[in-house]
Amino acid sequence: MTKKINMSTKYDSTAVEAGQYQNWLDEKVFKPSGNKKAKPYSIVLPPPNVTGKLHLGHAWDTTLQDMLIRQKRMQGYDTLWVPGMDHAGIATQAKVEAKLQEQGISRYDLGRKKFVQKVWEWKDDYAATIKKQWAKLGLSLDYGHERFTLDKGFSKAVRKVFVDLYNKGLIYRGKYIINWDPKARTALSDIEVNYKNDKGAFYHVKYPFADGTTFNGKNYIEVATTRPETMMGDSGIAVNPDDERYKDIVGKKVIVPLINREVPIVADYYVDKDFGTGIVKMTPAHDPNDFQVGKRHHLAQINTMNQDATMNENAGKYEGMDRFKARKAMVSDLKKKGLIIKIDPIVHAVGHSQRTGVQVEARLSTQWFVKMKPLAKMAIDNQKGDDAVHFHPERFEHTFLQWMENAHDWVISRQLWWGHQIPAWYNKKTGKVYVGEHAPSDIENWKQDPDVLDTWFSSGLWPFATLGWPDTNSEDYKRYFPTSTLITGYDIIFFWVARMIFQSLDFTGKRPFKDVLLHGLIRDEQGRKMSKSLGNGIDPMDVIKNYGADALRWFLSNGTTAGQDVRFSYDKIKSAWNFINKIWNASRYVIMNLGDMDKPELPDKSEWDLSDRWILSRLNWVVNHVTKKYDEYDFGEAGRALYDFIWNDFCDWYIEMSKAKLNGDDERNKRNTQNVLAYVLDQILRLLQPVMPFVTNKIWHIMPHEGKELALAKYPVDHPEFNDPKAESDANSLIELIKAVRNIRSEANAKMASAVDILIKTKDDKIKEIFENNKDYIQRFCHPQKLEIGSNVKAPKLAMTSVITGAEINIPLAELVNIDDEIKRLNKEVDKFTFEVQRAEKKLANKGFVAHAPENLVKEEKQKQTDNQTKLNAAKQRLDAIKKQK
């Protein structure tokens, strides 16, 4: 008799999730265990920017992190998952400035102090929103350890790192060509520049000789440029010293059009003599390569633009014009003066600011830099030792090393107000520079550098500064650093992962994390990157509202292949919801049939029947497989194994097999079945808890259990005594038989309720014994009117036939079956088994596969070949027999 329970007949994610997260916080479920004997396991959350709400990418990598933390917590580790957020200098300041601009206010109207106060208000609003989203996702973060990249402790760490690098000679201040964002009015590092194809042109311009020299019958040289607006900054012309065409004009001077400045022609190997005319104008203040050539030849550095990319006083009559308007005006004037030879339209890659989207300018500027060569060498050398960071997938280690080997000095100063202000002061009288963790005592005589540090400079300290560093005696630092695993997108290897590695090695002498798992991007169903312009973005909170957090988490984890992009699909979200609904209803059935059970206790092994031995053996396989796949970060394969076991083995078969026993008169058998059902369901809930925390916890609290929260229950472990290959083989034969009978009934339109004769011709005594011993299941699932099992069973003339491993099934259905249709069906069977046999033969003939594939795979393939050959022979024999009888 079933009992009444408070479970709806349909999974309702809103009702299931309500109140659970707050309860976990109240119960302090997410806190470290405090068990010093337990092995520590720590993750630092990649801090989201306080520029807006979380997107699907955040949902993806936080779900994977949560799965690991939850699993390790259940496995008895002392876990710590550190939450936090990043101040995101340029991005956040740009957002706040845009908001102020809508009110007709600029940051300069407010002044630095009031503007920064406005940004803090923005930060507080969005931090609150992000924390609500973390809760909706079910993230088991320890909020007692929450950090922000501008909090006091973090600021202390940042200042120490800057000062120490400066004192070691690894930070310097210099005048170099840098990438400049004219909208944000700040410097950018190389990796903050995105290149995209823009329409442009090569403008071929006449540069007359200053002394009237003629060259090739002309009194000018032809210079091609894509940026005529920078001509006012030209201070030289360069040719290749090996270019015979121009050896006679090296040392001559030409006149820069529109400005009438005399500049020298120099010889430098930078110039590619085979590109274009082989003559290049030199603008040292507006091009990084020209800057280097200019230094070698002592050419003047003339900056012609203001910080906002308008032309400055060095641009003559074009002063005050926007750079692109100035280009048009200059080209127009060159045409009027007859100095334009031709204009060739081109499409070329142009750098754009990653943050504001505007075209970047190469600009001569005094900035602070980090010397990368010694730091990069340290990171490269570390990958050769025992303390190396393990990249997953491995191919990304090559990406990391390649970038480190070619890293340029890193410009770390930003012309912003929001961020870590550089701890450098300049004496108001002498200009002397003081760098220190604290301001000079006579502060009235000093002025602090107004710039702030690149966001990545501070977030690069995240794994150790969040744990108390520079206090190396901090309990958290000593226990949880280095951290265990970092999970983030492959698109920020250079921005963040690399910087954490070399900064950690330099300041702690240790790697920041043992493993780094890099996932891809989430794209739309068409494979496009999600963006505002395409309008194809998906808000994870909308998905949770409609389908629940567990469905979103299942989709994000189950579709995961390390390093690969994922396509978002509502169909897959709906499939995830259907799977949860299946679990919900299966659990409802089990719980309704548990009677007055206090807690599940497996009966003695001697009392297990075939279905019990089979499901427990399958359970043990899935426990070991999922645990192994988690350790390998192969969450997709772990999910597939869980899905198949739960949906097919447990729900479709074991639960169905249990019904006859639960409804029978044998009370002992019934009790045993209840306990096996409850035990397997309990283990399933534990296995699923890391990925589906809400629904599993809800079900677990309804069924008999021990302990307060499922998140603190023990994770399933290996039970060697459950392994039973014979039970699995026997049950598989039985399941194959039942499926075959059902397929025959389906093809013949014979309802399951209608009794039919089932004649099973067995190939050997072993298979006969399996079917004889399990007649009860055959009776229940196949509904035979007459059941014959044996090697001498003869098939009638008109029958539906199916060949399975070790047996041939015949069902006489003369009144339902057309013999010609049966011949067609058997022909299809022959074709199917022929294909499978040939496929296996081809695979096993491949010497590479046999030599390098795991032994179990080769063995499995050989077994498939044998089985399919047997089935093929039987299908051919049956086909021949029917043809003869026709």
Image (cartoon, rainbow, N blue to C red):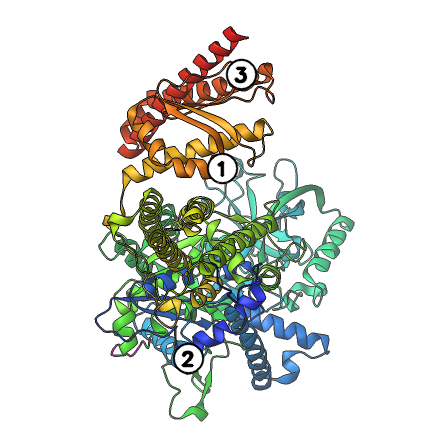
Residue 766 position within the rendered picture, expressed as x and y whole percent measured from the top left: 29, 28
Which of these two is toward me, 335 or 784? Answer: 784
Mark 1 lies on a secondary structure that is loop
Left or right: where 409 falls relative to 307: left
Indicate whether 287 appears above or below 96: above
Against 547, is 105 above or below?
below
Q: Earlier in the sequence, mark 2 or mark 1?
A: 1
Query: Whole-Å distance between the Cαs marked 1 and 3?
Result: 92 Å
* Residue density around tag 2, few if under 14, some if 14–19, many if 20 or more, within 10 Å: many
Disc 2/disc 1 C-alpha distance (Å): 48 Å
Q: Residues within 10 Å of mark 3 (few under 14, many from 20)?
A: many
Three-letter amino acid code of the residue under disc 2: Ala
Badge 3 amino acid? Leu
Q: What residue is disc 3 on?
A: 798
The numbered dot on residue 19 is none
Location of residue 607 in the rendering, given as x and y in whole percent from the top left corner: 28, 49
CA–CA distance in space, label 2 to label 3: 96 Å
Q: Earlier in the sequence, mark 1 or mark 3?
A: 1
Relative image position of residue 731 (x, y in whole percent)? 36, 38
Q: Earlier in the sequence, mark 2 or mark 3?
A: 2
Examine the image and state in which quarter residue 185 appears. bottom right
Q: Which residue is mark 1?
A: 243
- For label 3, the SS is loop
Percent x, y of residue 875: 45, 17
The range drawn in magenta is 469-473
Which residue was labeled with disc 2? 424
